[in-house]
Amino acid sequence: MGNRINRINYSIPGTEAVQKFIILFYLVGITGIIIPWTNPLFLRLIPLALILSFVILGIFHAGRWDSRILTVSLSIYLLGYAIEVIGVNSGLIFGEYRYGAGLGLKAFSTPLIIGINWLMLVYVTSSVTEKYNIRGFTGIIAASLIMLLYDMVLEQVAPEMDMWHWENNQVPLQNYAAWFVMAVGFHSIFKAFKIKTRNSLAGVILICQFCFFLGLYFFFNIIK
């Protein structure tokens, strides 16, 4: 019993209905990408899908969006975006890669939405570990490993979705090391400022996104 993880339950009215909507939303998304004649349309909708998920997380955040969490969130967005700008233009952080059109509007060869993606992933993985009462340094490492696993799957389908492309179509180990270090750094910022990430839909969105990319991986690499 001493090693049992204590699950913290928190939800607000309407959670179950929105959970069903999210699951259906991602099922429709993966179907639309797999079908050849709807593929171009659904690929263009990827940025909107990320923004919608981000907005839903904001609505179902179990707490006040005070100045502290807003400042930390903005900082994570700007840091994530700045590191990506340096990375894509220098090849020194993640390796040699370039962004395609899949993530929408760019500045400095980097999609503006990429900072939101970093913030969202840090938030949802933090929320999952917080929900299961995994705290302190262990929580930081656990959440960062979840982000790393997520990226390992995402990297396999990102080129097919014209999100980004690696030199010689090879994902360097350097990328995964950088992802993990950045994840640890961002989660450490959350912990240092005592940011609470209780959210009844964080786990659902994380699992749906992971299964979305995993399903596309099997389709593009095994079934197709």
Image: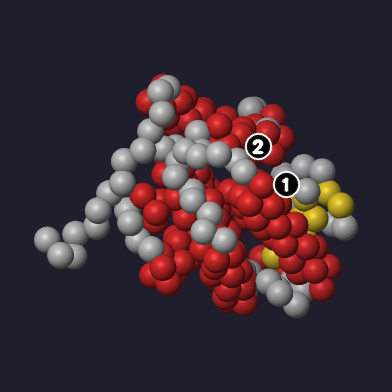
Q: Amino acid at mark 2?
A: Ile
- Give SS at disc 1: loop
CB contact under 8 Å: marks 1 and 2: yes
Mark 2 sits on what residue?
Answer: 51
Q: Residue at x 32, y 53 (%)?
A: 132
Q: Quadrant of the rendered structure where residue 86 is?
A: bottom right
For the residues labelled 1 and 2, the Cα–Cα distance comes to 8 Å
140 is higher (above) or lower (below) than 65:
below
Asked which secondary structure carries label 2, the reply is helix
Q: Quadrant of residue 17?
A: top left
Residue 67 horizontal side relative to residue 144, left or right: right
Q: Name the side, left or right, on which 153 lies relative to 139.
A: right
Report crowding for label 2: few under 14, some 14 to 19, many 20 or more residues within 10 A (C-alpha).
some
Q: Position of residue 112 (x, y in %)?
A: 78, 48
On screen, residue 161 versus residue 60, left or right, reads right
Q: Which residue is mark 1?
A: 113
Marks 1 and 2, the one that precedes in the sequence? 2
* Residue at (75% x, 77% y) in the render: 92
